[in-house]
Image (cartoon, coloured by chain):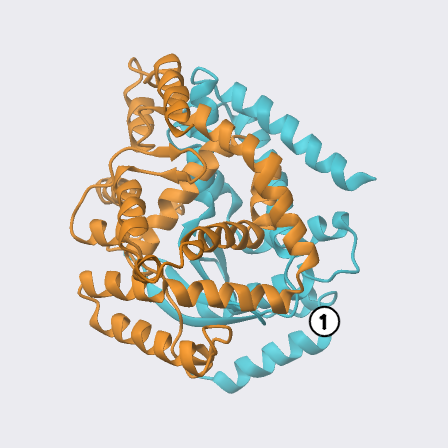
Amino acid sequence: MFAPRSLLAVGLALVLVGPWAAPEVQAAPADAKSFVANIGERALRELTPKDISEAERVKRMRALLAEAFDVKAIGKFVLGIYWRRTTEDQRTEFLKLYETVVSHSYAGLFKKYSGETFEVIRQVPVAGGGSIVYGRIKRMNGPPVAIELQVVKDSDTYKAVDIKIEGISMPLTHRKEYSSVIRRNRGSVAGLLDVLRKKASILEDSISE
Amino acid sequence: MPSRVVVIFAAAFLFAGCATPPKDDPEALAEFEKANDPIEPFNRVVFDFNMFIDKLIFKPIATMYDGAMPEYGQERVHNVLANMRAPLVFINDALQGEGKRAGVTAGRFVINTTVGVLGIFDVAGEWGLEPHSEDFGQTFAVWGAPEGFYLVLPIFGPSNPRDGLGLLAETILDPVNYWARSENIDELPISRMLATGVDIRSRNLDTLDEIERTSLDFYAAIRSLYRQRRADEIRNSRPSAIEPAPGISTIPNPAQRAESAALLD
């Protein structure tokens, strides 16, 4: 807000220095908007190249997830009413497996993109803290894809706690899906963990060849 | 033949019956009710049937089309189909009292049908008239009709009584089909429907594959995706009154959180 020019300079510097050196030089974003702009640009730059292996793509997504998202808060939301019914060990395992599945899922979604750009439109404060940043992925062909990120301040940086693509919240979709799996396993979180473990290992095997 | 299909689905409904709610667990029961799927076993049977037909017929055709037709051609086909839908979109814009959006749709139809050569080129889009979609299901929702329960329709897929009725209204009232029938161009409605099916399926090949690959319960994922997407379409992508918050800790008041969660579902 105060210094759009210096923001531009930081953004430009990030682009010039490139994705590999970026984490070391990345300054704390000035506001939620520039934080989201950075994630969007970084995701498109790092996850869309056609010449990287799937293992590399997933690895990059995993790093982005750990850095820019509050995976614990999202995982807690996804388990919903069942979070309180899980042991500490189960929670740790759930978060680890969930991170793996989500990394594969987003890496897969970005894979088909090429030549898109990301732009941030506006930022709206949320009651109780944090803000929602509205943006979109502009494509060469076809209409833009609406993206919404809810972010909260986390000490000197920000973390995303919700992501919506075309109005569809990914954490909410997972919450609905996973609670269905739990219900079909007679209310057992252990049952969900079994299914998650199998899924995570299938996904990991698919990129290890 | 159609009556036989009806019999098969009636039988599936009787055999599959209704979902068993977790009655002894109030919290889980609340979650179950929020999924809005009382006839889940039946829906799952139809969903599996649809997946079977998709893998057998629709997906191979869409994959072939996607492989054989260059992206440029696919865009042109999509534009023509979208343009033929414009009169229907216009009617629904108007019925929802969305004057400005109705104006955009009318402008798009006139410009793209003429300058854009029967809709092949989205000239209006380049001039700043961005496309949007509407249907009778959304109009009924705007009028206050409730969603009803989640319903998987054979072939057509995820729906609910409100959207199902909308689909029926659409097949009867679509202005372009209406015109085609009056001019005795009977091939147009059916070939248009088939082309639309191929267009939609080919545009979703990667995304659906990806969701299926990474989901634990594909049926439940699609159910949630459909319901959220429809809610967003009905709001015309405007933000909802209370924003949902997976960052649970960011909303201090549990009552407010419960309210936002209820709205969300």
Residue A85, compared with residue A148, is above or below; it is above
Look at the image and give the colour of chain B.
Answer: orange
Instruction: State the image coordinates of residue B132 (x, y, percent, origin top left).
Output: 37, 65
As helix, strand or loop, the secondary structure at mark 1 comes to loop
Quadrant placement of the C terminus of chain A: top right
Parent chain of label 1: A
Seen as rendered, the residue at the extreme bottom is: A5
Residue at image position (17%, 65%) is: B97
Q: Colour of chain A?
A: cyan
- Quadrant containing the N terminus of chain A is bottom left
- Badge 1: few (under 14), some or many (20 or more) residues near its Cα, within 10 Å? some
Residue indicated by mark 1:
A18
In front: B174, or A139? B174
Residue B258 rendering spot, x and y as whole percentages: 25, 39
Residue most extreme to the front: B184
Residue A31 can be seen, yes or no: no
| Quarter of the rendering containing residue A148 | bottom left
Q: Is residue B184 visible in the rendered structure shown here?
A: yes
Q: Position of residue B123 (x, y in %)?
A: 46, 80
Q: Is residue A52 left or right of residue A95?
A: right
- Name the residue rendered at 40%, 43% in the picture: B226
Q: Residue B14: x and y, percent?
A: 34, 14
